[in-house]
Image: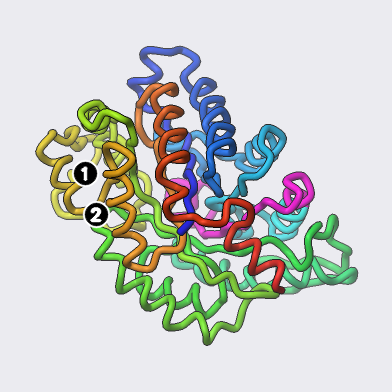
Amino acid sequence: MEFGLFCGGYVPKSMKENDPDAEHSRLMSEVDVAVVADQNNWKYWWTTEHHFLDEYSHISCNEVMLAYVAARTERIHLGSGIFNITPPVNHPVRTAERVAMLDHLTQGRFEFGTGRGSSTTEQRGFGINDPDLTKEMYDEVIGEFKHMWASENYSFDGKFWSMPERNVLPKPWLKPHPPMWVAAGNPGTFEKAARMGMGVLCFTASKPSDLEPLIEIYKNNIDKAEPVGEYVNNTVAVVSQFMCLEDREEAMGWLTNSGTGYQNSLLFRYLDSFPRPKGVPAWPTVLPEPTRDQMEQRVAAGMSAVGTPDECIEAMKTYENIGADVVLMGPSTSTWPKDIVEKSVKLFGQEVIPYFDKDPEKTRTARFRADA
């Protein structure tokens, strides 16, 4: 099992009230944490793409951030979590160009995560007034990238976009192309991802055991894949939460003072394609911060890896047992100070990751690409 970080660009009003440059501070701290991860056994660093979602995420041009982090790091793989590939948001050819350029600039370390967006705030901002159309848009685009990268005489005439014959440049550096991923959250998407031969980025706040049947659906269908790329990326990545410190009491203290109640309220304010769980109030009412007892229950259920390295190892065994290939942690969805985040990232990387990941040199996805 491999590990990565997920960078969200969370800039809540509480941070803005204390720091007039909070947006800049957050963006630069995300970069600094990536550098620490690169030096301490983490294999992936993913960053999101969102538009217009004040406080929740201030990372819109993630391709710029990915290129900058590439220059600051040496070994860690850098992923788009996601590139929105619907044509009104990003023209498919521009996406293909960015992916290939990032493959060069990262020297083969780029992971191509895709999606269609989860917020009508974003979709309508780009003129998409019917969210269901994004499914058709995604399906029309996703299979075209391999043709753009392979052909010198590419053209397309579809329902949502078209272009005359052109040579899309540059071509990916390492052939055939970077690993392809899709964000997924329901059984149908897991099965579809497997049949497309794509890795899955799974975002959930539930118990790991709740993911087991979804992972099983994926693994049961991946052998039937008709890949939209040139090879199958048989990988499930699950996003979770962690705080790894030598002192468990300190770790629990930070977990109950993380700002996650407010962050989750913003999630359901904006990402309105997700079903609202029972007990989550409509905005502007916000969820309270979790109590110590509630956090202890989350830790006991395996929903968060919190405490000493040994305790985090035990928590991560739960994800290993349900078949997760990669676990991604999202410390930047909190209001924790950067030094605490870096301390936790370093300790987890040095003491927890080597227990599970026995190949420090090459990622799982790089092996699939090399075999192709």
| Discs 1/2, front | 2
Which residue is under mark 1?
A: 282
Q: Which residue is mark 2?
A: 276
As measured in the structure, the alpha-carbon distance from the residue carrying label 1 to the one carrying label 2 is 9 Å
Mark 1 element type: loop
Q: Residue at x 36, y 76 (%)?
A: 216
**Location of residue 137 by image quarter:** bottom right
Q: Quadrant of the C terminus?
A: bottom right
Disc 1 and disc 2 in contact, CB within 8 angstroms:
yes
Above or below 173: residue 352: above
Q: Which residues are magenta?
A: 101-129
Using the image as rendered, state which of residue 1 and residue 50 is in the foreground: 1
Direction from residue 204 to residue 57 in the image, left or right? right
Q: Amino acid at mark 2?
A: Arg
Q: Is residue 275 above or below residue 219?
A: above
The quadrant where residue 327 appears: bottom left
Answer yes or no: is residue 235 visible. Answer: yes
Asked if the magenta segment contains residue 73, the reply would be no
Pinpoint residue 132: horizontal percent, then vertical percent: 45, 67
Q: How far from the left and from the top, in percent, is residue 60?
A: 56, 39
